[in-house]
Each structure stands twice: as structure tokens, then as C-alpha cells.
Image (cartoon, rainbow, N blue to C red):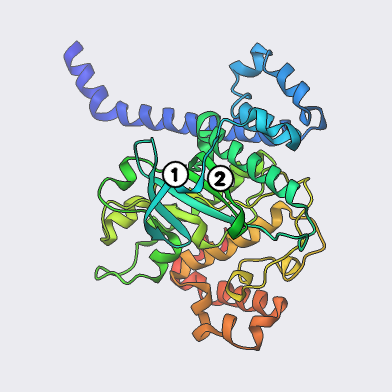
Amino acid sequence: VGWMRKMMWVAFDKTSTEKLVSEFEAWTQRTQTLLEAAWWPLSFFQTLERLQKLEEDKDAKTVGLLRGIGVRKLLVTTPALMHSQSQAKEAIPKDFFPSSQVGAFELGTLKGSDGHYMAEYKQYAPGGRSSVSDTVVRQRVLQLAALLHESPISARTLRVLQCTHYFEETPKSQFGLVYLLPSAGVANSQPTTLASILDATYKDGRPSLTTRTRLAHKLALYLQRLHTYSWVHKSLPPESVLLFPSDNGLSEMEKAFEDPRLVASEYSRQESDFSDQFGESEIKRNIYRHPTRWGQPTNRFEKIHDMYALGVILLEIGLWSRADQLDNGALVTSNIAHSSVAVQNKLLKHAQIRLGFYAGDAFRDA
């Protein structure tokens, strides 16, 4: 009888129990996210001293509200003190040996270190041509390196690469951030960007709606988690989404959608920080910019501007087409390309008319 009961439980009740446990875990995660969204924006937690005091609270630790506390402490640390807080190591440019390139990133090795690395370069405007001084830019880069070093350790849900080293190339007016790549992601092939995948043609067709929807959900979730820390990305075209397929086939690309990484964050990390109003003018990049951020913006960068860029990426995923290729490239080659409102209206038109057909009503209305 006991044996029969066990068999009946395995056959009928185990699946129900596992489903219940899974739903409970998801509910717990959502509750924790809501608590963090209400908890952390409070002004009480906007100083380093108060965060250090909070670390001593056993109850906060027990319920998981100290998740990512190391990142939060770095975000409120005075930039001038960042050098003493950063765990990212300063290197010299010749220590990095590039071997290949993915988009704007260089892949290679680092002197004295094992593993595979990726270098990202941050240009700056020397000689006072930016509204932000060279000293402040250096402090911001150091803060960014510190944050990207700490995040994979204390806030793994942010899904960013770990910055292990940084360097400055004064003759080229640029900084280099060096990231350690996941060993599993580069064992058989090099990483790629979402932009490259959108541009590629696969003999097996395009990714299924299910995998595209899962990718869209993950990117939205990652950005939401980033914003929970009052951390804005500031540069979110599909070139900033890194994927690690094991080969170039469509099925492996779909598997890589399960673990995308956000890269290429810009200098300013906190939403409350002021923006560098030096501006950018590249037409293709403007597609992902909120209309108020075109040219030389006069307003502060806010979370809504990240959300706008993400919305364009989600449109691309839904249609499985680069935005700059819509309407035969009209968004980058015609008079429309020079009007922020016209570009925005074109994107909205494609979302309203075509997205439901290619990705379904649920995707369109999300």
C-alpha cells in the first residue's frame, strides 16, 4: 500500500507540488522586487553612512533587502573618494593584447591573467569642449569601473560583465574598461551583439516567437533591476546587448537568448547625477534616443530615456528587423532622419500596425 501511494504521488501529485513551489518562488521574488522599489528610493538611504548602518541590521539581511548593498554603497560614494573604494585595477594600454573585434569591442588577452577579456573604449572631449571637466570624467570612469567590478559579485541579477581593469590612453583621448568574459561563453566561439544577430540571415529562418518573447522579457527585467538601484544605462542600442552562442547556428543563437548581458554603460550612473551635455549626432544612434535627448540635451538623463531605447529594441525583436532598415532605411536617409518627432511617429506606426501581426497582440500591448 505504501509503495502504491508513493507511485500515485509521483504520477499525479509531484507535478502539482513542483508547480506550487515554482509559483511560490516567483511570488516571493516579485514581492521582494516591490519592496526594494519602495525601500531604496527613500532619502534615508542616500548616504554612505546610513547604508553602512543598515548593513548591521540583521532583519534586513534575513529578508534579503541587503542584496546588492555593495553596489548601492558605491553609487553614493563621493567621486573623489572612489579611487580608494574601487577594486578594479589600473593597467596600462599595452597590457591588453587584442586578437579580434565584436562591434565596437575588442577581444583579447591580458598580460599576467588567464582567460578571455573584452576591452571597451570610452572617448572623452579634451580641452574643455564638454560641459563636464576632464577631472569629473575621470572620476566617473573610475566609478563605472568600480560598479562594474562589484555588480557581478553582490548584485548578480544585474547581468553585467565584470570589469577587472581600466586604463587611460591620453593621446587618443579615451579610457579603456577591460572585462572578464564568461569562460563557457567563449569556449567554442566569440560573443556577438544583438545588432549583429538582427543583421544576420540564418538558413533555418528567424528565431521563434517564444524565444524572441523570452529575450524581450529578460532585457526588460534586467533594465528594471538596474533602475531599482537608481542606475541609468544611458546607452542602449542593440549593440549594447551581448550574447554568447556556442556556434553560429540558429538553434545555438536561441539558446544564447537565455543569458544576454548589458554592456557599454555611459559615465553617469545615478539618475540624480547631472548629464554631460556634449551630445552625440550619429543619426543611427538617434533612433534609440528619446526626442528630448537629440543633439545637445538640456535636461537630465532619466529612467524614461532608457525605457524609450528599450522600447525600440523590443520593436526590433518583435519585427525581427533593425529599426534603421524599416521603410527602406527612411529613418536614417530621408528628411525624417533629422526630425525627432517624425522618427518617433514612424516607430509608433510600425508598432501599432505591424507588431501585432509579427509578434502577437500580447507582445504589442505589453
Q: Quadrant of residue 172?
A: bottom right
Residue drawn where x is 62% and y is 58% of the image:
173
Q: Position of residue 244 (x, y in %)?
A: 36, 50
Furthest residue in direction bottom, as rendered: 335
Q: Which residue is mark 2?
A: 167
60 or 264, nearer to the observer: 264
Q: Across the whole image, how many numbered discs are drawn on residues?
A: 2
For the question of whether residue 251 can be seen, the reply is yes
Q: Which residue is mark 1?
A: 95
* C-alpha distance separating marks 1 and 2: 10 Å
Q: Is residue 210 above or below residue 75?
A: below
The C terminus sits in image quarter: bottom right
How many neighbours does mark 1 have within 10 angstroms: few (below 14), some (14-19), or many (20 or more)? few
Q: Quadrant of residue 52?
A: top right
Badge 1 amino acid? Asp
What secondary structure is found at the residue carrying circle 2? strand
Q: Is residue 80 above or below residue 248?
A: above
Residue drawn where x is 28% and y is 54% of the image:
252
How many neighbours does mark 2 have within 10 angstroms: few (below 14), some (14-19), or many (20 or more)? many
Give the left or right position of residue 115, taking residue 69 as reference.
left
Q: Is residue 84 above or below residue 53?
A: below
Q: Position of residue 267 (x, y in %)?
A: 66, 50
Marks 1 and 2 close (CB-CB < 8 Å) = yes
Q: Position of residue 362 (x, y in %)?
A: 51, 60
Q: Is residue 192 above or below residue 144?
A: below
Give the number of the disc on residue 220. none
What secondary structure is found at the residue carrying circle 1? helix
Badge 2 amino acid? Phe
Give the left or right position of residue 196, taking residue 79 as reference.
left
Q: Between disc 1 and disc 2, whose residue precedes? A: 1
Give the left or right position of residue 200, taking residue 357 as reference.
left
